[in-house]
Image (cartoon, rainbow, N blue to C red):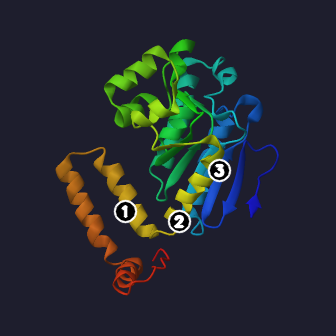
Amino acid sequence: MTDSPSPASPLQLEDRGAVRIIRVHRPDKLNALDSQTLDALHAAFREAAADDAVRVLVLTGSGPKAFVAGADISEMNALTPVQGRDFSLRGQRMMRFVETMPKPVIAMVNGFALGGGLELAMCCHLRIAADSAKVGQPEINLGLIPGFGGTQRLLRLAGRAATLELCLTGAPIDAARAQHLGIVNRVVPAADLEAETMKLAEQLAHAAPLALRGVLDCVNVGGECAIEEGLGYESAQFGLVFSTQDMREGTAAFLERRKPAFHGR
């Protein structure tokens, strides 16, 4: 059931049926993102994308305090301008890969999601937060700006006014306001966070994998293009799913008043 990498790894992996849980495991650093952790996350998501047994991913942080408290400041402090740019690109590449994953990724925000932590949560497809969680982009307090996509994804999720407020003031907000702004999808009591997240993950794991992928593709494409282009892409994807066994199974199950059994074919 549990597949944990070597003790030196900054991640812990666990499979629960078709759901893979990826935990950032640097509790002494509040799960802060350094170069090793960014690379480990990229590798873990690539592996999951290629594994047919994995249908849904849940991303979270170890311990009760933090999802990911930010990027590792001790590493950033010594970077040159060129190294800083490369560190930004490293994080952006990993998070863009997560954002364009062909399988749903749920961020289980169990505590602080600040700076790079909020950026990591925002690249996931869905976000469920504990009512005790805090999110924010506090880079301004360090003389920095967000570098892993925070200005861009926050703008798309919460709008210009909220993005400027969070990035210019650096002040964190609670989970309830984050939900109001559209940054997180759901807020649940901290004690129920894992159960509620897994309930959603299992629901998605039983859905048709190719249809899930079609939805993810359409939203990713549509978010970056004119509506006419997005509608055309949607129609093409809609036609494509008619070639799948899952579509035949789903429609037949509906007509026969039974639950469908999807196999990703």
Q: 235 or 46: which is nearer to us?
A: 235
Image spot of residue 248 (x, y percent): 36, 82
Which quarter of the picture shows residue 26? top right
Q: Are marks 3 and 2 in contact (CB under 8 Å)?
A: no
**Front of the two marks 1 and 2:** 2
Instruction: Specify the amino acid type for callout 3.
Output: Ile
Give the number of the disc on residue 214.
Answer: 1
The span from disc 3 to disc 1 (Cα, nearest Å) is 24 Å
Residue 162 shown left or right of residue 145 in the figure: left
| Residue at figure coordinates x 61%, y 47% from the top left | 193
| Residue at figure coordinates x 77%, y 31% from the top left | 28
Q: Residues within 10 Å of mark 1 (few under 14, many from 20)?
A: many
Instruction: Report the residue marked by disc 2.
Output: 205
Q: Residues within 10 Å of mark 2 (few under 14, many from 20)?
A: many
Instruction: Specify the amino acid type for callout 1.
Output: Gly
Instruction: Specify the amino acid type for callout 2.
Output: Ala
The span from disc 3 to disc 2 (Cα, nearest Å) is 16 Å
Image spot of residue 253 (x, y percent): 40, 83
**Front of the two marks 3 and 2:** 2
| Residue at figure coordinates x 36%, y 77% from the top left | 247
Farthest residue to the left: give it: 228
Look at the numbered disc 1 and give the secondary structure of its residue. helix
The answer to whether residue 111 of the structure is visible from this angle is: yes
Image spot of residue 160 (x, y percent): 32, 26
Q: 162 or 93: which is nearer to us?
A: 162
Instruction: Report the residue marked by disc 3.
Output: 22
